[in-house]
Amino acid sequence: MKALTFKPKFFSCLKNYNKKTLTSDIMAGIIVGIVALPLAIAFGIASGVSPEKGIITAIVAGFIISVFGGSKVQIGGPTGAFIIIIYGIIQKFGMSGLTIATLMAGVFLILFGLLRLGTIIKYIPYPIVVGFTSGIAVTIFTTQIKDLFGLTMDTVPSDFIEKWIAYFQHFSTADLWTTIVGLASIVIIAITPRFSQKIPGSLIAIIVMTVAALLLKNYCGITSIETIGDRFRINSELPEATLPAMSWDVIKSLVPPALTIAILGAIESLLSATVADGVIGDHHDSNTELIGQGIANLCTPLFGGIPATGAIARTMTNINNGGRTPVAGIIHAVVLLLIFLFLMPLAQYIPMACLAGVLVVVSYGMSGWRSCLMLMKNPKSDVSVLLITFFLTIIFDLTVAIEVGLIIACLLFMKRMAETTDVKAILDEIDPNDETDLKLENNEHLLIPKGVEVYEINGPYFFGAGNKFEEVMAAFGDRPKVRVIRMRKVPFVDSTGIYNLTNLCTISKNEGIQVVLSGVNPKVHAVLEHAGFNALIGSENICPHINVALAKAKEIVDNM
């Protein structure tokens, strides 16, 4: 087995590093740091933690992912995909539970990398990815309605349907000025790209709306616009690393959400790295990336942070602004650290409605509605996986959605594979014009000797197709003396296929019928040999092609 190579891109990029690349990375890192600031604050608050924890996550995870990751341009930090998972864990297990779950997710991610699962994870069906991403987007949007419109509510139900019922019941309490701030923030973010590609619309919206809220409060007497400082106590001090108390019962109960965090983080980070590869013409190391993500999620919660992964939007911002090595990601973390230490107290003046507007735009970007419409034109099985994953995400939770979605996708895949495998009976003669392993002169038809039955397996012979012989054998009336099974179109056989084939050979042997195999490819032949078929039917009865198999069958019939 090939040894695992853990080679972070950061160290290989330093070999040919120069001043020009450093200048580009510094500029890109500064811009990405500015872009990441409002998102880190918004994701932190939406996840149910204080705003500084979002920034701490972006600092610690962003630094570690850049140093130990397998992509040159990946920018790591908190993302919208984790909001619903984090919020649910905090509600059920508290902050200590979230810390433990994140640590466990870090361990899972490292194991994924060590077990070389980086390439396998990328093969998770596309409808599942679109389904849970769209479901997350809808759920994030739903959680922001209260702050966007300034609704007066004592508590917001956790259930999706109950949440919307409560919103409609309390919509009459909406605050006009809060609503204006929230909607204006969305408009600013939406139109900013028309005027500036460098400065993010979310940052402009936060600056403009914060100043507007302060002016309205100080000069117009409008105090109904809630700010971060009204809800949270801002702390700009770096926390000390602490490890929560753990118990085996808590660890067991946190395995499903921790595994969900790990799988979702792996999917999002590898998807981001793959997209980045296409832009910069590079190839990331999937397994190294997973290990780097795991290290980040082991370290971040020790400082009070939340789960982190590669962020597509910030990674693309990094690329578009000239970032070409992990140094840009490190600069981005340093910029966030400086903002955290010296400017964090100013965050208390940011309106909650403005952050809600930022997350509404984020949820729109995550929704992937165009991809959903495209998938709706695909086979019904794909549509079913998409819709089931989507509705399970918004009605139940992401853990259930991913588990059920994967099970359904696997079952549908097995059904499709079984449908591609066919077992048919060949009567009387074989037409050479439709054969690849037939060796005849003058294209004469090959007659099947009397007392011989010929069957052909087309496709993989696995558990989904193992019982098809029973249906086909009914086509023959009299009991034959020899059964020839053509396997030239069988690319692989699994243990259930071997069992069914063994059972058929054993039953045939007990009935005095000899089985002859024809056209078995080398890989399948090796599997059958290991399973004892040479002893069961005789190695001389495993023939290279149908000519030899029929000649052998005729010889057996003549000798009976």
Image (cartoon, helix red, strand yellow):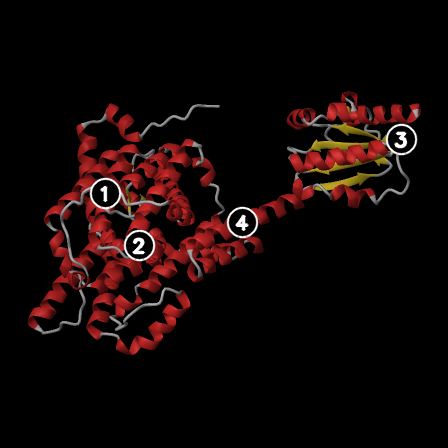
Contact between marks 3 and 4 (CB within 8 A): the answer is: no
Q: Residues within 10 Å of mark 3 (few under 14, many from 20)?
A: some
| Cα distance between the residues tagged 3 and 1 | 80 Å
Q: Nearer the viewer, residue 59 or 141?
A: 59
Quadrant in which residue 208 is drawn: bottom left
**Comparing labels 4 and 2, the label whose residue is closer to the camera:** 2
Q: Nearer the viewer, residue 391 or 374?
A: 391
Which residue position is annotated with label 3?
449
Q: Residues within 10 Å of mark 2 (few under 14, many from 20)?
A: few
Which residue position is annotated with label 2?
94
Residue at image point 47% right, 38% down: 120
| First reached walking from the N terminus: tag 4 or tag 2 | 2
Which residue position is annotated with label 1?
242
| First reached walking from the N terminus: tag 3 or tag 1 | 1
In the displayed structure, 351 sits above or below 321; it is below
Q: Is label 1 in a helix, a strand or a loop?
A: loop
| First reached walking from the N terminus: tag 1 or tag 4 | 1
| First reached walking from the N terminus: tag 3 or tag 4 | 4
Q: Amino acid at mark 1?
A: Thr
Look at the image and tell me whether residue 431 can be seen: no
Which residue position is annotated with label 4?
407
| Cα distance between the residues tagged 3 and 4 | 47 Å
